[in-house]
Image (cartoon, rainbow, N blue to C red):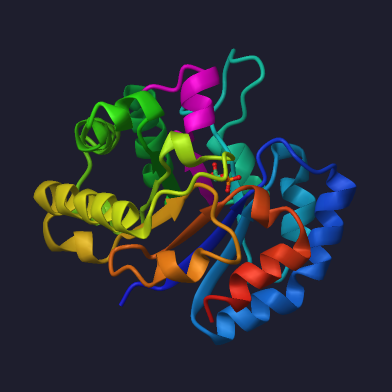
């Protein structure tokens, strides 16, 4: 049985003081989520990770939005896995489409990061998804299949059992244009089929999320799809009321 997972991606939003306020306000929600067998989390900016970890409930997942694959060295502006671990952070988003677009995050680079995370017993949330152009050219499965195959190459079934994959069609991120539940299910099922082809039955344990204009009004429909195990939510995760409504609507 795969546990549902609701993860907020705050992107480049919230001052540390605002993140702290949210973390304190989320304590009861984390309890409610736990009582209902739902994993709940947020991915703040690096500068807010420590305060969110300190002020949120123990069961709240606190994820970084990126990491470097080297432990230390001359990589100006980067943050490493041991630096995250020192703060008790063990979840990291990898390959978000905004990083693929603006920071040249390739499938190969994602693979290096995912391998480094797994070697350190951390949980990568590997984001995949096609652009509007690729969607319109009917290339969704070719693109997403390649992202999954290259991003997860040279890993074993044992390695990937805690991995999370998030399908986020680029054309639906922050646009209010949702993928229909049929598309979300079709692509999430396709991802699971690729995972099964690569790693065997462990594919049934790996959580696959949908992301892209998920709101309190539509989250339930996505989570009713058999292969959608949760949501990766941007805009609607920023305000505590809306975050609470997302959770309440999947209880
Ligand atoms: P929105 O929910 O704002 O569309 O963002 C989705 C996303 O990119 C989450 O990672």
Q: Residue 100, how many percent across, how many down?
A: 46, 24
**Quadrant position of ligand 1:** top right
Task: Quadrant for residue 132, please give it.
Answer: top left
Screen quadrant of the C terminus: bottom right
- Residue 229 lies, with reference to residue 99, above or below; the image says below
Pick whichever, 138 or 118, lies toward us: 138
User: Is residue 80 in view?
Assistant: yes
Pick whichever, 59 or 178, lies toward us: 178
- Residue 139 lies, with reference to residue 19, above or below; the image says above
- Within the magenta stretch, is there residue 105? yes
Left-right relation of 74 to 70: right
Residue found at the very far bottom of the displayed protein: 35
Pick whichever, 244 or 175, lies toward us: 175
Q: Residue 25, how many percent across, how many down?
A: 81, 69
- Residue 90 lies, with reference to residue 102, above or below; the image says below
- Within the magenta stretch, is there residue 143? no
Task: Quadrant for residue 207, please give it.
Answer: bottom left
**Residue at coordinates 52% horizontally, 64% vertically from top-left?**
218
**Residue at coordinates 71% horizontally, 71% vertically from top-left?**
57
User: Is residue 120 in view?
Assistant: no
For the record, the magenta segment spans 90-106
Q: Residue 163, how many percent across, how many down?
A: 36, 53
Residue found at the very far right of the displayed protein: 17
- Residue 70 lies, with reference to residue 230, above or below; the image says above
């Amino acid at each position: 049985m795969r546990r549902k997972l609701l993860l907020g991606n705050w992107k480049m939003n919230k001052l540390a003081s605002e993140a702290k306020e949210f973390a304190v306000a989320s304590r009861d929600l984390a309890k409610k989520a736990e009582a209902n067998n739902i994993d709940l989390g947020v991915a703040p900016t690096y500068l807010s990770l420590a305060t969110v970890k300190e002020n949120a409930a123990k069961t709240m997942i606190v994820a970084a939005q990126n990491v470097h694959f080297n432990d230390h060295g001359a990589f100006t502006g980067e943050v490493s896995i041991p630096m995250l671990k020192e703060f008790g952070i063990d979840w990291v988003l990898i390959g978000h489409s905004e990083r693929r677009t603006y920071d040249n995050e390739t499938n190969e680079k994602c693979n290096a990061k995912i391998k480094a995370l797994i070697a350190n017993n951390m949980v990568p949330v590997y984001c995949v998804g096609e652009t509007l152009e690729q969607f319109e050219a009917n290339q969704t499965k070719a693109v997403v299949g390649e992202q999954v195959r290259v991003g997860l190459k040279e890993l074993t079934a044992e390695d990937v059992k805690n991995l999370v994959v998030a399908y986020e069609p680029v054309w639906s991120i922050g646009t209010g244009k949702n993928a229909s539940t049929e598309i979300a299910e079709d692509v999430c099922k396709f991802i699971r089929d690729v995972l099964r082809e690569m790693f065997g039955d462990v594919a049934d344990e790996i959580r696959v999320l949908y992301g892209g204009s998920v709101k309190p009004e539509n989250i339930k429909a996505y989570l009713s799809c058999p292969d959608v195990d949760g949501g990766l939510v941007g805009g609607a995760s920023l305000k505590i009321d809306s975050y609470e409504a997302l959770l309440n609507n999947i209880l």
